Image (cartoon, rainbow, N blue to C red):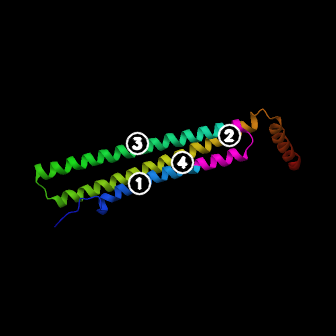
């Protein structure tokens, strides 16, 4: 029985597909953020606050994207090295059949892929939470700490209107 160890085999290509999908997801997120930032800059008049929001969001997205890319690359390299050394040691030293080794390698690769996907999902959730917090913080700064006096007056008038209605 022949075992296909090429990159075209389903077991080996699944890792490559996952890595490519992760890279594509990070690229799409960066593009979406840039588009949203451009639209916000065009619509909103407060350039300083928009610049702060843009800078903070872009920094978070880029840093997390780089970190995720580095983590995925390191995991892939470590897995490849461990698998190659493990296969050589097991086949040469222990003299186990190659099909048994390939089955073990497939299981290990699947576990690593699942762990990598979980890590990426956790990182994406954290990034979304951080971006939401940054946006809320910037909105708060815009309303309460802006040099434009009309912002505070509008907020006070809104609260006063609510108190009048509630009475």
- Under tag 2, what secondary structure? helix
Tag 2 near tag 4, CB within 8 Å = no
Q: Earlier in the sequence, mark 3 or mark 4?
A: 4
Q: Residues within 10 Å of mark 2 (few under 14, many from 20)?
A: many
Q: According to the image, label 4 marks what residue?
A: 30
Q: According to the image, label 3 marks what residue?
A: 70
- Under tag 3, what secondary structure? helix
Tag 4 near tag 1, CB within 8 Å = no
Say which quarter of the image contains residue 144.
Answer: top right
Residue extent of the magenta highlight: 33-49
Q: Earlier in the sequence, mark 1 or mark 2?
A: 1
**Real-space CA distance between mark 1 and mark 2, rounded to the nearest whole angstrom:** 33 Å
Tag 3 near tag 4, CB within 8 Å = no
Which quarter of the rendered picture does the N terminus lie within? bottom left
Q: According to the image, label 2 marks what residue?
A: 50
Tag 1 near tag 2, CB within 8 Å = no
Q: Residues within 10 Å of mark 1 (few under 14, many from 20)?
A: few
**Real-space CA distance between mark 4 and mark 1, rounded to the nearest whole angstrom:** 15 Å
Q: Residue at x 89, y 46 (%)?
A: 164
6 to the left or right of 24:
left
Q: Position of residue 108 (x, y in %)?
A: 29, 53
Q: According to the image, label 1 marks what residue?
A: 20
**Real-space CA distance between mark 1 and mark 3, rounded to the nearest whole angstrom:** 13 Å
- Under tag 1, what secondary structure? helix
Q: Earlier in the sequence, mark 1 or mark 3?
A: 1
């Amino acid at each position: 029985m022949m075992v296909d160890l090429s990159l075209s085999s389903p077991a080996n290509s699944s890792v490559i597909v996952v890595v490519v999908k992760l890279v594509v997801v990070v690229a799409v997120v960066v593009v979406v953020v840039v588009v949203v930032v451009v639209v916000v800059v065009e619509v909103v008049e407060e350039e300083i606050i928009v610049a702060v929001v843009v800078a903070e969001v872009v920094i978070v997205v880029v840093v997390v994207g780089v970190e995720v890319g580095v983590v995925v690359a390191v995991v892939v390299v470590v897995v490849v090295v461990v698998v190659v050394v493990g296969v050589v040691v097991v086949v040469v030293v222990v003299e186990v059949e190659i099909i048994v080794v390939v089955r073990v390698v497939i299981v290990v690769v699947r576990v690593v892929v699942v762990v990598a996907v979980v890590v990426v999902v956790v990182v994406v959730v954290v990034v979304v939470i951080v971006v939401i917090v940054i946006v809320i913080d910037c909105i708060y700064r815009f309303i309460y700490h802006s040099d434009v006096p009309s912002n505070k007056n509008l907020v006070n008038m809104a609260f006063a209107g609510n108190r009048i209605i509630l009475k």
